[in-house]
Amino acid sequence: MSSIKISALLGAVTLLAKANAHGIVSGILVEGKYYPGQSHYSTEPSAGWKADNGDNGFASSLTDENIICHNSAVPGTQYVTVAAGSSIELQWTAWPESHKGPMLDYLAPCGDDCTTVDKTELQFTKIDEAGLVDATSSPQVWASDEMISNNNTWVTTIPDSIAPGKYVLRHETIALHAAGDSNGAQAYPQCINLEVTGSGTNSLSSGTLGTELYTLTDPGILVNIYYPILTSYEIPGPAVMAGGGSGTQPSASAPASGSGSGSNSTSTAAFSRSSSAFGSAPPSSSATSASASSAVSATTSVAVTARPTTGNAVVSSTTSGAAVTATAGGRKFVCYEEL
């Protein structure tokens, strides 16, 4: 039929994503190489820790072992290789604007083997943080907003002082929309095994146990972000290590460079007709650049903004046609309507 049905279907999908209202780190990009992130459904080997968060929900507690790497988390079986001083792009699935809060990154050495480490013994050092980015704008801008605007991607840099070795990266956002109530803050920690290379000498011999990072009464945990209007925000957890970053993110429209930043590019692709059902296939681990099918009928086209590696796409406009589909970075996106 007309584009109305296609638009309605896409709108319903968007609403479902918002209703789900949570996310995970589905992919990691380091120096042009893509690594799969956390997937509670996949049985494939991954550097991302598996956790009992199939609902994409938050950690059940801020003070027990589930806060370390999420609920019932178990170590990843592989490693992401990264040179000290290099940036890591952490690619989130859909994240709702209502879930505003800080973005934080920690490192913990895990000895000779992160795949068998006891998470309760990991001692974390904060390497990066960002909280209330702009208190004067309306609405206020939080670090989570920057992650969303940067194509649902957060960029952190491994300090160049970090000694070669194996570490667990603990990446996290804390949603504060309900934090005005006791135990209302919602933490979404994600853990990833890293093998750091380079010539640094800081082995992070001391840190903070994951269960001791926060208390329920920390100013950055128990806080009403709506009223009275905040003029500042105290980011929870220990201080950032010397040589760590502030979490400044590159602009999606004007990629930045330098410490604590990375680049983000988008490509616009056209959808082509298909009879497949709406869905997606996981990206290939070898995907390093966005590509999309360009076979387009004269009457059916949809603009797509695709992530440069995983091919996550956002439909920005539709026109008429029986079905539309596109692939980007090895991932397939299809939408169809009933004729």
Image (cartoon, grey):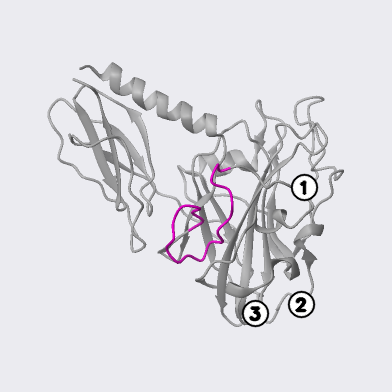
Which of the two discs, 2 and 1, sits closer to the camera? 2
Residue type at tag 1? Ile
Residue 189 visible in this rendered orientation of the protein = yes
Q: Residues within 10 Å of mark 1 (few under 14, many from 20)?
A: some
Which of the two discs, 3 and 2, sits closer to the camera? 2
Real-space CA distance between mark 3 and mark 2, rounded to the nearest whole angstrom:
11 Å
Residue at the spot of label 3: 163
Residue type at tag 2? Ser
Q: Residue at x 85, y 45 (%)?
A: 218
| First to last magenta residue range | 37-56
Q: Is residue 38 magenta?
A: yes
Residue type at tag 3? Ala
Q: Is residue 55 left or right of residue 202?
A: left
Q: Residue at x 76, y 77 (%)?
A: 205
Label 3 close to label 1 by CB (< 8 Å): no
Label 2 close to label 1 by CB (< 8 Å): no
Real-space CA distance between mark 2 and mark 1, rounded to the nearest whole angstrom:
23 Å
In the structure shown, which secondary structural element does the residue marked by tag 3 occupy?
Answer: loop
Q: Main secondary structure of the magenta part?
A: loop
Residue at the spot of label 2: 205
The label on residue 116 is: none
Q: Position of residue 51 (x, y in %)?
A: 58, 55
